[in-house]
Image (cartoon, grey):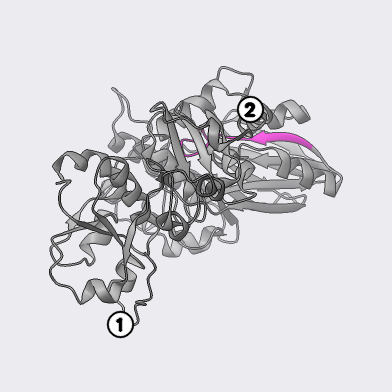
Amino acid sequence: MYIQQLYTPCLAEAAYYIESNGEAAIIDPLREPDPYLQLAKERGSNIKYIFETHFHADFVSGHLDLSKKTGAEIIYGPTATAKYPITTAKDNQIFELGDIQIKVLHTPGHTLESSCFLVIDNQGQDYAVFTGDTLFVGDVGRPDLAVNANLSREDLARNLYLSLQEKLIPLADHVILYPGHGPGSQCGKALGKETWSTIGAQKKYNYALNVDSEDDFVSRVTEGLSAPPQYFPKNAQINKEGYSSIDNVLEKANTPISVNEISASENVLILDTRSPQEFSAGYIPGSINVGLNGFFAVWVGTLIEDLKTKILLVTPEGKEKETILRLARVGYESVIGYLEGGFTAWKQANKHTDKVSNICPVSFRNNPAHKSVLDVRTLDEYSNGHVDGALSIPLSEIYKHLPNLNKAKVHYVYCKSGYRSMIASSILKRNGFDHIVNVKQGYEGISSKNGCCSVKP
């Protein structure tokens, strides 16, 4: 038996490859099938099954493309229905894979069809369990994504409590826990830093498995839940209904567009994926910056509401295809192309540019006369410490705060370390706020005695 975790940090997502005696199964694949096809080819195996722990909300799964290329059966847990052929498994149903077995454990709570997959080795012993968004390291899945007119988040939390008590806690302590997400995922509240664990360790350390009662569990897992990102229900719907082949998406979007072909049409959003430092030094007016070196897809999905928005990319050299793929992973397939030659070509053509002013943390600290300071971190981060007088405007909520901000004022913007503040600064500039100053190094720099003060404009 061979198991490999394929972890994607920018989505905090874990897919899995399981193999036994020349047969392989994939659990929760990302949009692109190539990594799984390549791994199976290298190991001389055939992909037999594609197991989905639930209809994912935070990314578009790759099950359809992978199934078309391999003939593998797509398997969901009980109650799942889709607009394409799937196998809806029964609770406790066994699937044979080489010399091992994979047992379906229906664990409703995060969603109604949520299921875990228990690997039983060739000796008949429970070996590992793939828990999707039911149980994480240090946390459990949020119980508010499947809320409807007849089902509250408290109802889902009670389902989740029973699932954990009846299906996962009874497993032996040595059973390896392979969750669907790691730290940074918005499918839970506070996931631990590890991407795998054991059932025994979670019984000991996971707060959600150490509660006094069902009511205590419900209270603890529902308190402090922020609203899920707006793209979550849209991605879940795509995963239920189906989508275009990723090959077609890449072929259509991976199109160079020259400087002279770019128009000032309001129907096209220019998305600049360079680093915050590069962007602030110069960019095409009206662009929004979401750097690739961060939770890129998450922030695009949070801030660009319409999945059908026409997007023109400005990327670091050689990152065009990667950017298109990472957008498609969260359902954005309307990329019209990328700026040929990148921002360098734009400058060389003597086109109009804009920039974001920066201030170093030392200068910011030493100037108490700041008129308006915007903290774009989360409410929890803000409550744990912030600049005196700073206005809390979480980046995820920035659009609803725009009407309340004075465009004539100078606004100083900071986050934790500078990634989110540049996204916020670009959005503010795009919406007519001309006097924006980004605080480099963010709150980490502001609160550190060693903040750097060598800042380029």
Q: Nearer the viewer, residue 128 or 370?
A: 370
Q: Is residue 114 visible?
A: no
Label at residue 1: none
In which quadrant is the C terminus drawn?
bottom left
Query: Residue at horizontal 29%, vertical 56%?
Result: 377
Q: Within 10 angstroms of label 2, few (less than 14), some, or many (20 or more) residues?
A: some
What is the span of residues highlighted in magenta in the rendered image?
Answer: 47-61
At mark 1, the secondary structure is loop
Q: Main secondary structure of the magenta part?
A: loop
For this orientation, the residue located farthest to the bottom is: 449
Residue designated by label 1:
449
Label 1 amino acid? Lys
Q: Is residue 416 visible?
A: yes
Q: Classify residue 196 by image quadrant.
A: bottom right
What is the x, y in percent for residue 197? Answer: 55, 61
Count of numbered labels shown in the rendering: 2
Mark 2 or mark 1: which comes first in sequence? Answer: 2
Direction from residue 217 to residue 94 in the image, left or right: right
Label at residue 252: 2
**Residue 432 against residue 413 in the figure, above or below:** above
At mark 2, the secondary structure is helix
Q: Nearer the viewer, residue 353 or 42?
A: 353
Q: Classify residue 338 by image quadrant.
A: top right
For this orientation, the residue located farthest to the right is: 44
Q: Within 10 angstroms of label 1, few (less than 14), some, or many (20 or more) residues?
A: few
Direction from residue 394 to residue 339 in the image, left or right: right
What is the x, y in percent for residue 315? Answer: 55, 47
